[in-house]
Amino acid sequence: MATTHWTSAQIPTLNGKTVLITGANSGIGYQAALELARHGAHVLLGCRSRQKGEQALARLRSESPGASAELVLLDVSLLSDVRRFATEFFARGVALDILINNAGVMALNPRQVTPEGFERQFATNHLGHFALTGLLLPALGASPAPRVVTVASIAHQGGKIHFDDLQLARGYTPWGAYNQSKLANILFARELARRAAGTKLLSLPVHPGVSQTSIVANGPGDKDLKTFVLFKFARFLTQPDAAGALPTLYAATSPEARSGDYIGPDGFMEMKGYPTVVKPRPHALDQSTGERLWTVSEQLTGVVYPAFQ
């Protein structure tokens, strides 16, 4: 169980550790990168945009002088780019201690399809991270205590895995697609934890509550009814991105974190607060659904995980 009022001050020294965070140029990803770098890790800021990534790196260095961080270009919506990145990472010849699957897009309207033919939210939020984790397993295995943290959302509560139409070519709705992708995040993280049980690898799903990040502006904006309400009552319902990053940081670093636990805020309806173990909805705990999604994800990405030993 997470310690009451756990904060980033409790992050242990991370000297010598290498961390990769996807979507690290803003929001939860940036705040996690900043704190992990402050505590001694070498942080790779995985960003789709070179310009935004360079701005984030400059900001991090100004906020934490002397921090060890670098920009790496990575678009998790494209499996070809995930493969390219993995090849370049292995050329470094270093272990990967912490992988934070954070990048995400929300409630895109209208429906968008990637050049590889996948619905963009499912591709970005789930498939790309599934492939990235699988491809980087040897680097994670080279770490003495590797962790994979996958950022989900309370939106999983309304999610359903549409196995007969995963790309939602029929009946697409912006929030339906987002909810499906966030449910997939939890199912993946927990299935990874189950498969890796008894090994040194820890896998935890987390969620940031309702945090003030750019994902809303980049997705539905304030014209969508749900987000209009959040904007109008933001001060009461949401928390700053630095607070929203705490569940991610806890899962990535706390000695008390247990593989498979779902970490989120402890406040009203899990909207904000300090990190604690929370319980996802029952459909996110269904092992048969997690196993089926895993198999389909291997087929769609072409990334087949080796057996864990």
Image (tube, rainbow, N blue to C red):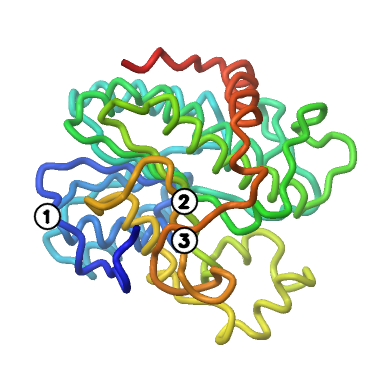
According to the picture, the residue beneath numbered tag 1 turns out to be 13
Type of amino acid under label 1? Thr
Q: Of discs 2 and 1, which sits in the foreground?
A: 2
Q: Is residue 274 above or below residue 296?
A: below
Q: Secondary structure at mark 3?
A: strand
Instruction: Determine crowd level at label 1: few under 14, some 14-19, many 20+ residues with C-alpha closer than 10 A.
Output: some
Type of amino acid under label 2? Tyr
Q: Is residue 26 above or below residue 17?
A: below
In space, the residues marked 3 and 2 are separated at their CA atoms by 7 Å
Type of amino acid under label 3? Gly
Q: Are marks 2 and 1 in contact (CB under 8 Å)?
A: no
Corner quadrant of residue 65: bottom left
In space, the residues marked 1 and 3 are separated at their CA atoms by 23 Å
Q: Quadrant of the N terminus?
A: bottom left
Q: Of discs 1 and 3, which sits in the foreground?
A: 3
Corner quadrant of residue 228: bottom right
Q: Residue at x 67, y 29 (%)?
A: 115
According to the picture, the residue beneath numbered tag 3 turns out to be 264
According to the picture, the residue beneath numbered tag 2 turns out to be 262
Q: Residue at x 49, y 73 (%)?
A: 272
Corner quadrant of residue 221: bottom right
Left or right of 207? Residue 5 is left
Q: Nearer the viewer, residue 40 or 263?
A: 263
Q: Is residue 234 above or below residue 243?
A: below
Instruction: Determine crowd level at label 3: few under 14, some 14-19, many 20+ residues with C-alpha closer than 10 A.
Output: many
Q: Nearer the viewer, residue 11 or 228?
A: 11
